[in-house]
Every structure is written in C-alpha cells, then in structure tokens.
Image (cartoon, grey):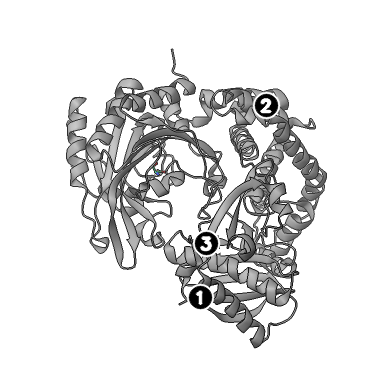
Amino acid sequence: MVMTSSELRRKYLDFFKKNGHEIIPSASLIPENDSSTLFISSGMQPLVPYLLGEKHPQGNRLANSQKSLRTEDIDEVGDNLHTTFFEMLGNWSLGDYFKKEQLNWIFEFLVKDLEIDPKRLYSTVFRGEEKIGVSKDEESVNILKQVFKKYKIEAKDIDFPEENGMQDGRIFYYSARKCWWSKSGTPEKMPLSEIGGPDSEIFYDLGAELKRHENSEFRDLPCHVNCDCGRFVEIGNSVFIEYKKIENGFKKLKQYNVDFGGGLERLTMVVQGKNNVFETDLFSDLIKKIEELSGKKYEENKNSFRIIVDHIRAATFIIGDVRGITPSNLGQGYIVRRLIRRAIRFGKKIGIGKDGWLKEVAEVVAINYEDVYPEIKDNLDFISAELTKEEEKFILTLEKGLKEFEKLNNVSGTDAFNLYQTYGFPIEITAELAKEKGINVNVEEFRNELEKHQELSRTASAGMFKGGLADNSEATTKLHTAAHLMLAGLRKVLGDEVYQKGSNITAERLRFDFSHKEKMTGEQLKDVENFVNGIIEKDLPVWFEEMPLEKAKEINAMGVFESKYGQNVKVYFIGKGDKNVSREICGGPHVEHTGILGKFKILKEESSSSGIRRIKAILE
Ligand code: SER
C-alpha cells in the first residue's frame, strides 16, 4: 500500500511529537508585521521573534505543517518539482537541541518511518567562509558519517563536487550559495539584523536511469547533488540558525536554533515512487477534474495541466486564508490575479470552454484539504465568488487580446503594455504567447512603460510604491513610528486632505509619499518637525488594539487598506485619551514609547509625481 500525503504529514508530526515537540497550527499565508515577503515562504518566518529569543508559549520544541508560497518560481511551474503553493513540514529547536539530535532524527524519520532507501540519500554541508568568520561545518560531517553508518553506509565527504562531480561521495561541501540559509539568501544579501546560518540539505536520487543529466543543459558539466539537472531532488533542509547580521559581519545569537523544513509535495513524490510532484495524490483529483473539464488527457498536455492545477490551488489558498487577499492590481492581490489569469489562459489552450469552471476546481481543493485546512471549505462561497468574478473579467478581454496579439510579428514594450493595460495580460502571459509563436517581447521596455504609467497615475493609490520596512531592526522600527508621527504632523499643518501614499523605511532614513498639491514652505516643514519632536519629548506611549476593519474606519484610523474581509486589523495608537495624536491601521512593529526616538529631522521635500509630495527624513 502506498503511503498517502495525509499519512505522511501525520507521521511527520507524530514523529516529532514523540520526540518532545508541540504541534503548532500553520500560520496565515499572509505575513504579519513583516514586509520582507508578500507571502509566508517558509515555516520559520512566523517564528523569527522566538528564534531571536522571545519565549514561545508552547515551549522550545515545535513542529508543524506550514502553508507556504514562493512566487519567484511562478515561471518554473510546469517542470517536475516546482509549485507556487506548498506545504512545508517543519520542526524547530528554540535554543534547545542542536545538530546531533536534528540530523539523527531526520534520517530516522526518512528511513524508518517513510521507508526511504538510505542508499538514495545524500547530504550537503557548509564549506565555510573566511570572509564572514564561519568555518567548515565539520561537526555536521562527523555526525552525518555516524548517521549513515547506522544504515550500513560508509559516507565519504567530498569537497568541490561542482567541479569534480560525485566521486563516490555521500556528504558534499558547498559554498554559502547552496549551504547557507536566510530569508534573503546568502550572507551578503542579508539585511542588518536578519538571522540565518549554515545548513545541511538532504537530497534524494531519482536515479541515473531517467537520464535527466544527459538530456539537460548541464550535460557537459559534472553531475552532482546540487546540479540543476533534476536527477537529485532536495527533500529537506536543516538550518542551524545561530547568526545575526551586524554592521561588520555576523554575531552569534544568544541561542542556537534548528530550523528544519521539508516540502510535503516532494516527500510525497519520493514515498509514492514518482519522479514528479504533479503525479502524487496531492494533485490526482485536481488533474482528474481538469481532464473532465477539458476532455483532454494529462499525459498529452502535461505543462498546461500542471500550471492550471498549481495556480488554482495557490489562488484558492490565498483567497481562502483567514487573512484572505482578493485579486487586484496591487502587491499580493496582483499575484492572485496573475495566478488566476495564467490558469485561465492555459485552460483555454486545452479547450476548457465552460463558464465558471475555476470554482469547480476550487471545490476539489476544499475537499482535498478539508481535514487539514478547513478554512478553505469554510470560505468556499467567498473563494468561488472571487474566482468567478475574476474569470468573468478576464474572459471578456482575453479573446480580444489574443486577436490583437495574433497581429503582431514581434512584441515591443508598447505592445506588451497595451496588452497589459487594455486586455489585462500580465507580462508572463504575453511572454509565453510570444515564445509559443517564436517571436520576441521587449520586457525591459514594457517595464519602463509600466513605470512611466505608474508615475503618472500614482495619485489614487500607494500600492505600486515599493513600500514597507526594509527590516525589523531597532533603527528601522524607530523610523516607522516617526513616520506615523510625521503623517499626524502633516495633517495638522497642511490639513485633513493629506493621506499617505506610500512609504519606504530603512535603518538609515524614511521616505514617505503623501497627497499634497504644492511644494511645502520652509515654515510648514519646520512646523511638522516641531510637532514630531514635541511628541517625542512628551514620551507618549505607543500601543495597538485589534478591531474589525469597520471599527477602525469608524474611529478614523488612517491606513492603506488591502482587500481583507471579515478580519480584525491592528490599529496603532500614539498617546492615550485626549493626548492621542495618531491612529493608523498597521501591522507594526513600533517602539513602545516616543521618548526613545531621538531628534526628528526632515532632509528633503520634493515632488514625487502629480499631486504627490515626497519627504526624506531621519532620526538623529
Ligand atoms: N527555512 C529553511 C528553508 O526554507 C528550512 O525550513 O529551507
């Protein structure tokens, strides 16, 4: 009997429960107090405060299955391994156990509980990097050698597999590009105060007989576990989160953490003996549904089928989340829109002609996940309505847009922009159509056109502004609170027509766009500065309350509203009672009282676009 994905998920949680872990629920797919990604992209993300040392109410050994979404892979969907939405099985040690327990446990789980053949498993470890003062992870190598020995495997460690291939090795050293994990990637890419560390990944060998390497673009290079030919698939990653990025490198955290993550889709693929995630039970009902709707066979239309089932599943999870997001042209909403539209386009390509078919697919998702993520079934009416609305909208323009496209012999940036603007074609749809027809698209010119257009139309919404906080450092947090005070000051000095139109805050400075027609006078700028510094001097408390969106509107809280429904929002207040000077819908983080902000100074006030001014300011 083949193990189902549900059994696999259950076995993983049971295994870690048996080893002292508390099972915590999956967090929402939509990050809170964290603008670093549009969606939660790994299980550790909602746990960052606890990895930094805050006490978790459920203890220091946790495990779960986390809903995750990675949108950078959107164009890769269609191959054998990539999905946008996925579930990440994760376990964490918050300053409790470390490498030895983790590496022993995870192999025990794979080999004993999942009955994976250990001969097909390989490990990687960090080669070390002098520049950042972190040495070769020999500790993990020694542990891994013992682990493999338990399964009667003599594990040889090999350096530079990228250059010399496998050389009968079992454990391979790699650079930080492959064996260091943080939300932002390699050590150089990490912003100040982000946490991360070396990792040890586990790879599964799908087998040389598939001839993936020979048939790939890498055929002239040696094959190794991290070669992207597809022969080896990463099925788990143990990250040893012990570092925090500081000004001149890295500082050890107060506690050593383990952050393990393994994709349920890929693990299921391995235990079900497949070499493709879309052929596991996680997708079988969805594929069947698409066969029924299109009258076509998956086998003959693999790429289109994979894109459709992946994208509708992802869109269903985003819309159906407790903090659900609906299709729009902004941020997360634009991701949902792109997923839905791309699915519709491929649906059309394989001949799905029926109106309202997307909701039928969402119903299958709801049933598949009824026991694990009941919110999908609970919100199914809402999800169906949103999918159908978007389908109706796009169907109207898709046909016409395709006709327009057919007339083109190559696609200039202006053409692509016209398809985007008039027919609602996200750029990847245009790019794919062009590829199918064997013509070129000028994507760069398209982006310039888009930017120009956004500059012109950035009066009504702040959505396209690259917004939010660069990181969660103390300096950035202070400037974030200062931005709230500045908005209050601007409204006091310039009037209530002033609204925030966007913000971008780093540890060094804040940049803030707001609606106002004329250049501000020197006196007005001084008044705003004085207002902010006055509040800093008064040392007023900063706090928040959660309330329904409607109540936040009633009390005139400021805020850029995303389409949220039926959910509470967080409102940040500065000052209590009649001393209250600011209330904003905001996820935080903020300082606890204004006294610690220092001195607020406006450096520059300039035009941002028509009717929008921009201020750069700092705290000294
Ligand atoms: N955070 C790590 C990853 O995403 C392990 O969970 O790979």
Q: Are marks 1 and 2 in contact (CB under 8 Å)?
A: no
100 to the left or right of 92: left
346 to the left or right of 166: right
Q: Which residue is the site of mark 3?
A: 541
Find the distance from the CA under tag 1 to the CA under tag 2: 51 Å
Give the class, few, some or many, for how many residues have Cα within 10 Å of label 2's Cα (few <14, many ≥20). some
Task: Tell which of 346 and 410 is nearer to you.
Answer: 346
Q: Are marks 2 and 3 in contact (CB under 8 Å)?
A: no
Say which element carries label 2: helix
Q: Nearer the viewer, mark 1 or mark 2?
A: 1
Residue 370 is labelled as: none
Q: Quadrant of the N terminus?
A: top left
For the residue marked with disc 3, what is the amino acid?
Pro
For the residue marked with disc 2, what is the amino acid?
Glu
Task: Tell which of 359 and 297 is nearer to you.
Answer: 359
Give the class, few, some or many, for how many residues have Cα within 10 Å of label 3's Cα (few <14, many ≥20). some
Q: Who comes first in sequence, dot 1 or dot 3?
A: 3
Label 1 lies in ligand 1 vicinity (Cβ under 8 Å): no
Q: Outermost residue toward the top?
A: 1
